Image (cartoon, rainbow, N blue to C red):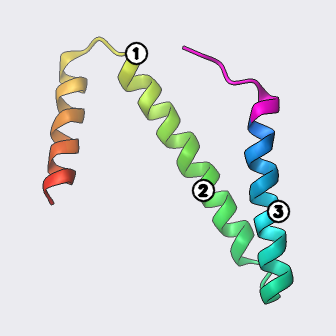
Amino acid sequence: MTEIPLVRLLYPLALALLVAWWYISWSGDRKTPWAGLARMLAQLLLVGYVLAYIFQTEHVLVVLGTLALMSLAAGW
C-alpha cells in the first residue's frame, strides 16, 4: 500500500481551513464549517480504511458482498 506523506495532506487541509475562515467571515456562523470539516474528515478516514481492507482481503465473500452492495446502491 502506498503511504501518503503527512506534508502532502496538509495542502488540502490548508485549503479547507481557508474556506472555513472565508465562510465564517462572510456569514458570521462559527459552528457550521467546523462541523462540516469534522464530518468530512471522519467520512474520508472511514471510507479510506474500508477500501484498504476490501482491496487487501482475499476473502471471496467480502468481495462478493461489496459488489452486491455497490450494485444495489447503483440500481436504487
Q: Secondary structure at mark 1?
A: helix
Q: Residues within 10 Å of mark 3 (few under 14, many from 20)?
A: few
Q: Is residue 4 magenta?
A: yes
In the picture, the quarter occupied by the N terminus is top right
Q: Residues within 10 Å of mark 2 (few under 14, many from 20)?
A: few
Q: Quadrant of residue 66?
A: top left
On screen, 6 above or below 35? above
* Cβ atoms under marks 1 and 3 closer than 8 Å: no
Q: Position of residue 58 (x, y in %)?
A: 29, 11
Q: Position of residue 71 (x, y in %)?
A: 16, 44
Q: Which mark is residue 47?
A: none
Question: Residue under circle 3?
Answer: 18
Q: Give the extent of the magenta segment.
A: 1-8
First reached walking from the N terminus: tag 3 or tag 2: 3
- The residue located at (51%, 35%) in the rendering is 48
Question: Residue under circle 1?
Answer: 56
Amino acid tagged 3: Leu
Amino acid tagged 2: Met
Q: CA distance from mark 3 to mark 2?
A: 15 Å
Q: Residues within 10 Å of mark 1 (few under 14, many from 20)?
A: few
Amino acid tagged 1: Gln
On screen, 22 above or below 70? below
Decide if residue 56 is on the left or right side of residue 38: left
